[in-house]
Image: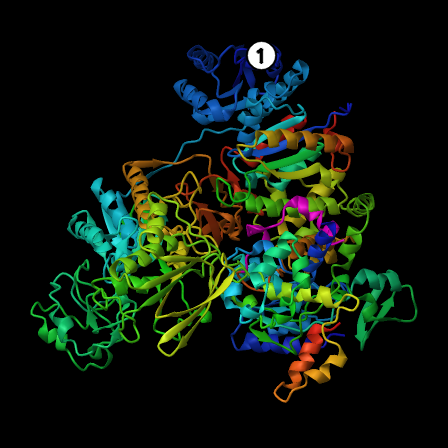
């Protein structure tokens, strides 16, 4: 159950629309089902009342939408940002991807969002409705007579279980209480993989990446992937390719995708959220983040506007690539 | 499709000995685009080059591959050959089948196989080559020298001597810098003023040189050959062109008690002042923080006394925009602050001074008219302790001091000690040293003279603490060779403070996009081979802004920098390297990744309007590469996430084609 | 010699001192208030430990003359921290069987109206296992 | 000397100013190394895009080595510092995906280090040869 309600958000949005602070609202819109919430632009209190939703499935990070939508809006654009979204917001500002003056950002608290695939794993398919009831979700399906009650905490998305921060690093206005940067265990899974043998790791990734259907959802949802034209669509890049014709290209795509956001990725987890094949893509990003933290000192992309990403920076004392693999031995 | 000609060189038996050149030529015939393939004994000979020229004409070749020695050897040669044949010189690729094939492999079969592969890679690349034309940019034939010390003065004089106009920007009211404050110079002991002031006069009288004193650089735009610089001329409240420097105002000014910067605060000056008698320009300056008229409108004595009418209380800071082809940084150094060195009691006793202060104390134009007197009571000191390496050669992690050796202290301390013993032979002089470093012509001889002829007591060890007690300074020190602790009652303690770059250097480096090391010394383009150039084209380094230096070294570097500037300004046009980065605006996101990694500051951003497919327009921030500044390293091409940035001559597709050819 | 090598490494490990950083300026010794009491001075501790010449130090009264005032640590331009090395050598002696410099029985004889209690406590801690 | 039948394919990216000159010097001094090494000249090691490395593996390379000026000696002052970070991140990622880390290497070879160049190549070829064919990052379509 979120601490902030749909009604509070609509009231805030309507107020800002009516007093002229903003001309449009970027918010979560009603989809076909209760769980497929869609990013939507609202222009009036009426539209908000009819279409705006806020529930445990509002995971979408709106920062990326600002790149295209903020420039087009006549006045300011209101955007609701969960704590993790604000990091992407700052990172995009660092990269000059939208005009800060065109945006009115309202920070909202987040209790963690649910993962629909985890819900379906319990309830089965054919979900007709999902409603929050205290700390539970009540699910009705076409195939079950009685509603199924699921504890929300049992179906939280992986990124929310390992939430890195409940603190907003950017906003014009904050609703609810400000949270703290959390000590999360988000690198545990990466560490577990690192501890495996190379063969085991290869088998793990072979299994995961071979499921890729190259739908590009990870790229399209990623707030760091805002290129005017992606390198994979650029014929002059030499790596242009559109489909995962074989396993090399699956790997190539995912290595390059992760490499291109390395140092810029805020670890918002959108890539894994949107992956229809449930590939744990965030692990690739977190591997880079973990490495960068260990090699070059702690760095959280988006924590500060105008911070210099580690891969476009250096010190004369940086470790050698060969030393990367020796570190463990030295400590032993 | 290109029409490629392949020319395989035997290099006598150098290549042909381990590579079957005929087989190579034959194999490459079948590569895509190749219409002609041959081999010859010496491709670089006139006959070989003629063979290429004829083949280009005969077969309408558009690209050339020479399989020969290293491109580092003969790429330039074959580019000229191509140009002679009417081709663009950048349509040539070299396959290095000598240094990287025949000379390192002994097996004919393996060598031939590898030579064919290297040839294929070159063919694959040349198929994607495009004609490149080096950019040309005009050169503004004027130079700017930032800093008017001996470095800046020498550079300016040398440039002006070659017939080019030079402007000097100096933030103090006069040029002269640190050298003007010195008494004598080592190792010859001639007086600093006697050799410096004539040069200052030369600067003033040279019609090619303009001096912007009491001024600073406010903004730098542009690039090599074409800098646009904004100079901020601070208000000195005296009209420079009218003031005769007679000094009447200085004498009559009632606000007399202001610390005199030129004498390092050891005496006072009036609110209106001329730093020293030989100042250039010899013009008065009003200190706005000291002048009663400027502070509360009461006084006006100087304006009344000035018969020339030069005083102007309403003067404002002035911004002047100028164009230059080259910029020389000569911002110099300062001694570091002694605030953190409590053990030497610098802040507790007036009789603990820095070496630069000692220079003023012994200078005939200084606060004591050259008589060595203790700052506290004016008595002449009987025992003087010199301490070396104060704040130099410290640990990188130490809270105080610098890691480097300040280089000049050993010699000036020997000079000071020698001068004291010479003028006041009854004075006892101790020098505490860690090492005495005297590389330089006649330097060690000079130091030995101080010890052997003048009886200066050099003690290997360091001073641990100085405690003022009564009118004495209790100095506790170690004598490491005697394994003793010494206790000396000194009258004067002189600290050889480390030197550091002037504080103005850091913001200036940012403006110039010139790089600095962690100590804020400017970095040279190459530590051995290009010591007076900064990595930023058109920016040159003169004097101690690049590292600690004594006067002879500073002057030689200043002249070297001038020579580099003259070489640049002598050109009418600058021809660039055409293998530079360029950005595809349609794909650029304006994310600044490329600009962050560019070592030369060659990338700028502009907001550009783009027509969208739906006929609307959209303004986007996009990168543009300045062809005159880009050196073609390619760092930006990898930083660019979208692949909008590419490198001409080493394009993504070209390198990938080479990879493919090798791996086929 | 082997024994010395082991002891040397142990002393360096315990103290965390890197004697190679020393540039032999002698500022530590220059600043030492206990110089006249000490047979070996701070800079000698650094160079003797570095060269493995540790035996004389182990036997020297200097170990107990060092005031642990840390002036040498404060003044060292190279961050070598000689006092930590003196401390490490002292510890290596008093930690040996029967190595205590001060036993509880000695204390009463040392009592003196002018000696502050605190000093005895601190000496006891410094000189005993 | 151990005779290894398997001939690996090694792609070496060398910066024009130091390592390529170092390779030339190895040639001038006739310091032998296996013909399996094929050098591609780039202006600076920082020109080497990770995609080039992956491309080489895709097309059948068994090892890729990048050589640049020693840190601090870069012709472009700082290019190799970026290379060092990029390659540290990339190599670590390849290792994370289970691709043998011995197949990638970054070495600093100056223009004076012809002997080091030859020794490095000998060592790298031997290392890669002992791993055998690159199977984990290959594209079967590119096989003959």
Q: Is residue B186 depicted above or below A13 in this figure?
A: above
Q: A244 and B141: which one is in front?
A: B141
Q: Position of residue A14 (x, y in %)?
A: 60, 76
Q: B137 and B256: which one is in front?
A: B256
Residue extending farthest front: C109
For the point 61% across and 60% down, which residue is it? C45
Residue extending farthest left: B307
Looking at the rendered image, the quarter that the N terminus of chain B falls into is top right
For the point 7% across and 70% down, which residue is it? B307
Q: In the rendered structure, which segment of residues is drawn in magenta?
A: A307-332
Q: Chain of mark 1?
A: B
Give neighbour class at mark 1: few <14, some 14-19, many 20+ (Cα, 10 Å).
many
Q: Position of residue D82 (x, y in %)?
A: 56, 46
> Tell me, what colour scheme is on the image?
rainbow
Q: Is D104 on the left-hand or right-hand side of B558? A: right
Quarter of the view holding residue B663: top right
The residue that label 1 is drawn on is B16
């Amino acid at each position: 159950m979120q601490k902030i309600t749909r009604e509070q958000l609509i009231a805030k949005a309507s107020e800002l629309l009516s007093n002229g602070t903003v001309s449009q609202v970027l918010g979560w819109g009603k989809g076909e089902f209760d769980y497929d919430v869609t990013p939507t632009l609202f222009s009036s209190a009426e539209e908000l009342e009819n279409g705006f939703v806020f529930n445990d499935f509002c995971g979408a990070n709106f920062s990326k939408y600002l790149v295209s939508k903020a420039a087009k809006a006549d006045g300011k654009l209101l955007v609701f940002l969960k704590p993790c979204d604000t990091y992407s917001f700052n990172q995009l500002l660092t990269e000059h991807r939208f005009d800060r003056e065109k945006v009115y950002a309202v920070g909202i608290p987040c209790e963690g969002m649910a993962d629909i695939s985890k819900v379906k794993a319990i309830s089965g398919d054919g979900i007709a409705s999902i409603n929050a009831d205290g700390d539970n979700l009540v699910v009705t399906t076409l195939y079950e007579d009685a509603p199924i009650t699921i504890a929300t905490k049992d179906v939280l998305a992986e990124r929310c279980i390992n939430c890195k921060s409940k603190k907003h690093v950017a906003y014009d206005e904050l609703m609810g209480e400000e949270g703290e940067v959390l000590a999360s265990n988000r690198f545990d899974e990466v560490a577990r993989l690192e501890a495996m043998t190379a063969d085991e790791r290869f088998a793990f990734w072979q299994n995961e990446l071979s499921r890729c259907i190259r739908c590009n959802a990870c790229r399209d949802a990623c707030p760091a992937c805002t290129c005017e034209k992606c390198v994979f669509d650029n014929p002059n890049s030499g790596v242009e390719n559109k489909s995962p014709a074989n396993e090399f290209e699956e790997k190539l795509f995912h290595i390059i995708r992760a490499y291109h956001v390395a140092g810029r990725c805020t670890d918002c987890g959108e890539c894994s959220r949107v992956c229809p094949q449930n590939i744990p893509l965030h692990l690739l990003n977190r591997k880079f983040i973990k490495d960068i933290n260990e090699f070059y000192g702690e760095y959280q992309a988006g924590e500060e506007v105008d911070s210099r990403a580690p891969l476009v920076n250096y010190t004369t004392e940086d470790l050698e690539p060969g030393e990367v693999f020796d570190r463990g031995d030295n400590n032993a | 499709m290109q029409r490629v000609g392949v020319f395989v060189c035997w290099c006598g038996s150098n290549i042909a000995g381990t590579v079957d050149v005929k087989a190579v030529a034959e194999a490459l015939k079948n590569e895509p685009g190749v219409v002609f393939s041959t081999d010859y004994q010496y491709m670089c000979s006139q006959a070989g080059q003629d063979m290429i020229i004829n083949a280009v004409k005969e077969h309408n070749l558009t690209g050339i591959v020479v399989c020969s020695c290293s491109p580092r050897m003969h790429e330039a040669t074959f580019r000229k050959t191509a140009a002679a044949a009417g081709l663009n010189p950048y349509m040539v690729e070299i396959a290095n089948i000598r240094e990287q094939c025949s000379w390192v492999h002994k097996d004919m079969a393996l060598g031939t196989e590898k030579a064919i592969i290297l040839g294929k890679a070159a063919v694959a690349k040349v198929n994607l080559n495009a004609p490149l034309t080096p950019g040309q940019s005009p050169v503004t034939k004027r130079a700017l020298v930032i800093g008017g010390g001996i470095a800046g003065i020498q550079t300016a004089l040398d440039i002006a001597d070659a017939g080019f106009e030079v402007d000097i920007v100096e933030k103090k009211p006069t040029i002269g810098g640190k050298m003007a404050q010195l008494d004598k110079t080592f190792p010859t002991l001639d007086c600093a003023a006697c050799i410096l002031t004539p040069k200052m006069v030369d600067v003033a009288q040279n019609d090619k040189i303009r001096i912007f004193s009491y001024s600073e650089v406010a903004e730098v735009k542009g690039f090599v050959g074409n800098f646009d610089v904004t100079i901020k001329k601070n208000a000195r409240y005296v009209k420079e062109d009218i003031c005769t420097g007679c000094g009447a105002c200085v004498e009559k000014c009632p606000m007399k008690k202001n610390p005199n910067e030129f004498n390092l605060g050891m005496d006072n000056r009036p609110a209106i002042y001329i730093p020293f008698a030989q100042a250039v320009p010899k013009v008065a300056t009003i200190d706005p923080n000291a002048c009663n008229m400027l502070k509360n409108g009461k006084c006006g004595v100087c304006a009344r006394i000035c018969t020339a009418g030069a005083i102007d209380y309403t003067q404002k800071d002035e911004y002047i925009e100028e164009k230059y082809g080259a910029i020389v940084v000569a911002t110099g150094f300062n001694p570091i602050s002694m605030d953190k060195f409590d053990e030497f009691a610098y802040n507790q006793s007036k009789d603990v001074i820095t070496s630069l202060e000692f220079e003023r104390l012994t200078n005939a134009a200084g606060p004591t008219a050259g008589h060595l007197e203790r700052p506290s009571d004016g008595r002449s000191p009987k025992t003087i302790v010199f301490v070396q390496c104060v704040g130099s050669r410290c640990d990188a992690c130490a809270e105080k001091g610098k890691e480097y050796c300040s280089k000049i202290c050993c010699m000036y301390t020997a000079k000071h000690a020698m001068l004291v013993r010479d003028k006041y032979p009854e004075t006892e002089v101790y020098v505490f040293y860690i090492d005495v470093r005297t590389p330089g012509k006649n330097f060690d001889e000079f130091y030995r003279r101080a010890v052997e002829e003048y009886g200066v007591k050099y003690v290997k060890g360091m001073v641990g603490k100085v405690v003022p007690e009564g009118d004495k300074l209790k100095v506790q020190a170690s004598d490491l060779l005697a394994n003793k602790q010494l206790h000396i009652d000194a009258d004067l303690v002189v600290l050889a403070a480390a030197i550091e770059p002037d504080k103005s250097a850091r913001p200036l480096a940012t403006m110039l996009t010139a790089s600095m090391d962690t100590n804020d010394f400017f970095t040279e383009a190459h530590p051995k081979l290009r010591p007076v150039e900064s990595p930023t084209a058109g920016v040159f380094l003169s004097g101690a802004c690049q590292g600690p230096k004594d006067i002879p070294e500073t002057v030689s570097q200043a002249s070297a920098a001038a020579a580099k500037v003259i070489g640049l300004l002598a050109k009418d046009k600058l021809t660039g390297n055409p293998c530079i980065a360029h950005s595809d605006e349609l794909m650029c996101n304006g994310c600044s990744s490329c600009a962050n990694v560019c070592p030369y500051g060659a990338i700028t951003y502009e907001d550009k309007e783009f027509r969208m497919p739906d006929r609307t327009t959209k303004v986007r921030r996009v990168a543009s590469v300045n062809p005159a500044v880009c050196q073609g390293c390619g760092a930006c091409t990898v930083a660019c996430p979208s692949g909008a940035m590419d490198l001409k001559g080493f394009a993504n597709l070209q390198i990938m084609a080479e990879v493919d050819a090798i791996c086929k | 010699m082997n024994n010395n090598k082991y002891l040397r490494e142990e002393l360096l490990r315990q103290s965390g001192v890197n004697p190679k950083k020393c540039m032999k300026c002698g500022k530590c010794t220059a600043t030492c208030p206990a110089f006249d009491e000490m047979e070996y001075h701070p800079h000698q501790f650094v160079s003797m430990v570095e060269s493995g010449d540790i035996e004389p130090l182990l036997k020297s009264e200097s170990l107990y003359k060092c005031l642990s005032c840390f002036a040498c640590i404060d003044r060292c331009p190279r961050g070598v921290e000689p006092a930590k090395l003196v401390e490490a050598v002292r510890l290596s002696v008093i930690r040996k069987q029967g190595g205590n410099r001060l036993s509880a029985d000695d204390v009463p004889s040392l009592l003196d109206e002018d000696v502050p209690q605190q000093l005895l406590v601190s000496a006891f801690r410094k000189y005993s296992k | 000397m151990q005779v290894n039948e398997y001939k690996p394919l090694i792609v070496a990216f060398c910066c024009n100013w130091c390592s390529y000159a170092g390779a030339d010097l190895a040639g001038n001094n006739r310091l032998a190394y296996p013909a399996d090494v094929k050098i591609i000249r780039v202006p600076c090691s920082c020109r080497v895009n990770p995609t080039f490395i992956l491309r080489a593996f895709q097309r059948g390379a068994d090892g890729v080595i990048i050589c640049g000026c020693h840190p601090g000696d870069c012709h472009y002052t700082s290019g190799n510092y970026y290379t060092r970070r990029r390659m540290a991140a990339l190599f670590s990622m390849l290792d994370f995906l289970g691709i043998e880390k011995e197949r990638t290497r970054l070495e600093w070879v100056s223009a004076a280090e012809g002997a080091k160049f030859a020794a490095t190549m000998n060592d790298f070829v031997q290392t890669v040869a002992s791993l055998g064919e690159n199977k984990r990052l290959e594209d079967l379509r590119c096989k003959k």
